[in-house]
């Protein structure tokens, strides 16, 4: 289009709706469209302008309806399907309209909306595909987690997690039927498997707890029967055995377990409190004996170190006789006193062993024989060294002399051993 034509087009105003109609003298009104002219109605007893204006207002109402529909479709307020239905309805109204105006232009505006609806439909389809893919990925993730829970042993947290997964599953859109049914079957099967295993586990625990209850009730009865015993040693061992069996029994039903333990513990406390009180009373009585034995130990320790073995042995025998006659001492003093007494006994035993070693005739004879042999070997080596020097063999003389010196060191040690037997 030339610049002059564009200017002319811009200066020419768009024709008004009335220019698309005409009025007969009898008030009959016609509208012109691309298909030709058609009758739209009759308004008798009024002037041509008024008759035409009546049908122009109807056109303006249709034009407003088209404008509103355009706005709603462009904004996305209508779904593509609803928009298509609305266009079809308005198109029918425009096509058969008893109105005067540019009806062809209204139809063209309606037709121009079809590509927009197609784009919106494609966009919604793509969005729906994206949402379906996200929903599929989410459901597959839920299924994997559910199957992992079903194979595990989280009997408390697993229940809450399955409940949360189910609520999240319900909030997701459905997929195509085959995929949705397949994933749901896996999820539901995992939940069923978990529920069955959980019930079986709790049933087993309940059975075990019931068995533990019966065992612990028996142990409580035994413990209560021993509570007043004064046979301190064996009863202490019996309570130790009861405690081992109690730990091996496992937990009883909640609540009852604590009650049984309180009874069991009360029986133990009763026995051990009586035992402690008795021993404390005995310890007070035995303190005098402890003092007496400590005095004896002072006498015995005065024998050390031992210089007169016979006197030490006689003194120790006398100490033991008086020690035995004194009697029991407090429990915490037994070990220290016995340790000091054994130290005195050990010193006397060592002195006896040393005396026997010094007076053993066989050992003395062996020591003297060894010394004599060493002396003879030294004489032989010295003689050998003298002969070697006489013939000028310095190497042989030196070797013989060195050997003699070595044997002389051994002789010194052997002579010391002989002198020990003379002590």
Image (cartoon, rainbow, N blue to C red):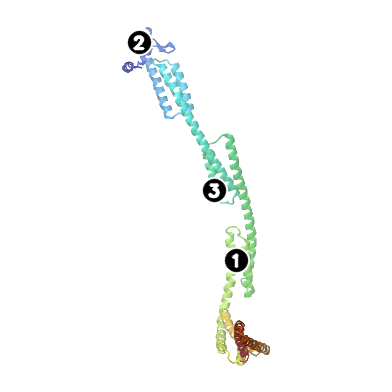
Q: Say which of 351 and 344 sits in front.
A: 351
Residue 6 in the figure: left or right of residue 90: left
Where's the N terminus, which quadrant? top left
**Nearest to the observer: residue 214 or residue 90:** 90
* N-term mark: 3 or 2: 2
Q: Position of residue 94 (x, y in %)?
A: 43, 18
Residues at circles 3 and 2 in contact by the CB criterion of under 8 Å: no
Residue 50 on image: x %, y %: 35, 13
Q: Secondary structure at mark 1?
A: helix
Q: Is residue 112 visible?
A: yes
Q: Which residue is mark 2?
A: 48
Q: CA distance from mark 3 to mark 1?
A: 37 Å
Label 1, on which residue?
264
Q: Residue at x 46, y 24 (%)?
A: 115
The alpha-carbon separation of the residues under discs 1 and 2 comes to 115 Å
- Which of marks 2 and 1 precedes in the sequence? 2
Q: Quadrant of residue 36?
A: top left
Tell me the crowding category of disc 1: few under 14, some 14 to 19, or many 20 or more residues within 10 angstroms, Cα based: many
Provide the residue designation for mark 3: 160
Look at 42% across and 19% down and name the residue there. Answer: 108
**Residue 325 visible:** no
Q: Residue at x 59, y 60 (%)?
A: 256
């Amino acid at each position: 289009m030339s610049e002059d034509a564009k200017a002319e087009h811009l200066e020419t105003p768009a024709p008004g709706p009335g220019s698309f109609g005409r009025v007969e003298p009898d008030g009959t009104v016609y509208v012109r469209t691309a298909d030709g002219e058609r009758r739209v109605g009759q308004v008798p007893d009024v002037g041509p302008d008024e008759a035409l204006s009546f049908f122009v207002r109807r056109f303006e109402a249709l034009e407003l309806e088209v404008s509103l529909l355009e706005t709603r479709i462009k904004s996305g307020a209508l779904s593509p399907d609803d928009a298509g239905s609305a266009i079809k309805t308005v198109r029918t109204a425009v096509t058969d309209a008893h109105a005067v105006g540019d009806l062809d232009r209204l139809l063209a505006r309606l037709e121009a909306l079809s590509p927009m609806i197609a784009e919106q439909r494609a966009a919604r389809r793509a969005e729906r595909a994206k949402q379906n893919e996200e929903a599929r990925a989410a459901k597959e993730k839920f299924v994997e987690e559910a199957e992992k829970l079903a194979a595990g042993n989280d009997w408390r947290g697993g229940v809450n997690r399955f409940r949360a997964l189910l609520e999240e599953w319900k909030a997701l859109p459905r997929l195509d039927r085959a995929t949705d049914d397949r994933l749901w079957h896996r999820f539901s099967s995992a939940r069923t498997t978990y529920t069955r295993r959980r019930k079986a586990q709790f049933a087993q625990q309940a059975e075990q707890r019931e068995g533990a209850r019966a065992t612990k009730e028996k142990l409580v009865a035994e413990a209560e029967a021993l509570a007043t015993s004064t046979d301190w040693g064996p009863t202490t061992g019996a309570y130790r055995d009861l405690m081992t069996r109690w730990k091996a029994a496992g937990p009883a039903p909640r609540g009852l377990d604590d009650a049984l333990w309180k009874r069991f513990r009360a029986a133990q406390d009763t026995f051990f409190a009586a035992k402690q009180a008795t021993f404390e009373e005995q310890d007070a009585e035995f303190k005098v004996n402890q003092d007496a034995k400590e005095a004896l130990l002072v006498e015995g320790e005065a024998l050390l170190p031992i210089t007169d073995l016979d006197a030490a042995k006689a003194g120790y025998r006398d100490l033991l006789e008086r020690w035995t006659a004194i009697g029991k001492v407090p429990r915490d003093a037994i070990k220290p006193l016995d340790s000091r007494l054994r130290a005195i006994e050990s010193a006397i035993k060592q002195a006896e062993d040393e005396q026997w070693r010094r007076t053993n005739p066989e050992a003395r004879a062996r020591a003297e024989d060894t010394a004599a042999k060493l002396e003879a070997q030294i004489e032989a080596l010295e003689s050998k060294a003298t002969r070697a020097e006489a013939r000028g063999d310095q190497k042989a003389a030196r070797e013989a002399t060195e050997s003699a010196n070595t044997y002389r060191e051994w002789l010194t040690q052997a002579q010391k051993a002989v002198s020990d037997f003379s002590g």
